[in-house]
Image: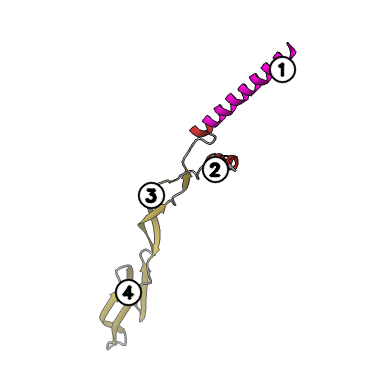
Amino acid sequence: MKHTLIIALLIFLSSCGAKPPVRYVPVNSETTVRERPAMVVIPADSANLRALLECDSLNRVVLRALDEIKTPGLESNFSLEEGKIIYRLRTIRDTITVYVTDTVFREQVPVEVPVPYEVNRLKWYQLLLICVGVFSIVLFLIKVIYKSLTKVL
């Protein structure tokens, strides 16, 4: 019983160690700002024209009053020739280039990195047990050789 308890104690002391510690790598966040050109379409423009037309004594059409309201992005041309109204409207520009700033945030997820450690490093008591075992085997072999030699001689 005494030997069984000693063997169980030796097995318990020479068991495997704990898991290696884990180290977390710090999180890196990165911000990228870039400026890029973007084409923007100008919305539709509008114009209002109010003209007062009258006939004179010679039965010709005469323009008495002209009122024109338009947005700033338009060019217009109005004329009255031989009783015909000619109104031309032209859009100066339909798209413009606007520089847009894009901001991109990148955040990296922390990664578990095991801390390096020595795998098969013997503990002090394991080294002591090995030395005691080797010493006892050497003593046993010396004893066996000595007895065999004394028997032969």
Q: Residue at x 39, y 63 (%)?
A: 40
Span shown in magenta: 127-153
Please say whether residue 55 is one of the residues in the magenta stretch: no
For marks 3 and 4, the one nearer the N-term is 3
Q: List the residue tagged with mark 3.
A: 30
Q: List the residue tagged with mark 2.
A: 12
For marks 4 and 1, the one nearer the N-term is 4
Residues at marks 3 and 2, CA–CA distance in whole angstroms: 50 Å
Q: List the residue tagged with mark 4.
A: 78
Assess whether mark 2 and mark 3 are in contact (beta carbons under 8 angstroms). no
Color theme of the render: secondary structure
Residues at marks 2 and 1, CA–CA distance in whole angstroms: 38 Å
For marks 1 and 3, the one nearer the N-term is 3
Count residues near mark 4 (Cα–Cα under 10 Å), then give few for <14, some for 14-19, many for 20+. Answer: few
Could you tell me how many numbered marks the image carries?
A: 4
For marks 2 and 4, the one nearer the N-term is 2
| Tag in front: 1 or 3 | 1
Element class at badge 3: strand
Looking at the image, residue 52 sits to the left or right of residue 100; the answer is left
Residue type indicated by callout 3: Glu
Q: List the residue tagged with mark 1.
A: 148
Q: Residue at x 39, y 47 (%)?
A: 26
Residue type indicated by callout 1: Ser
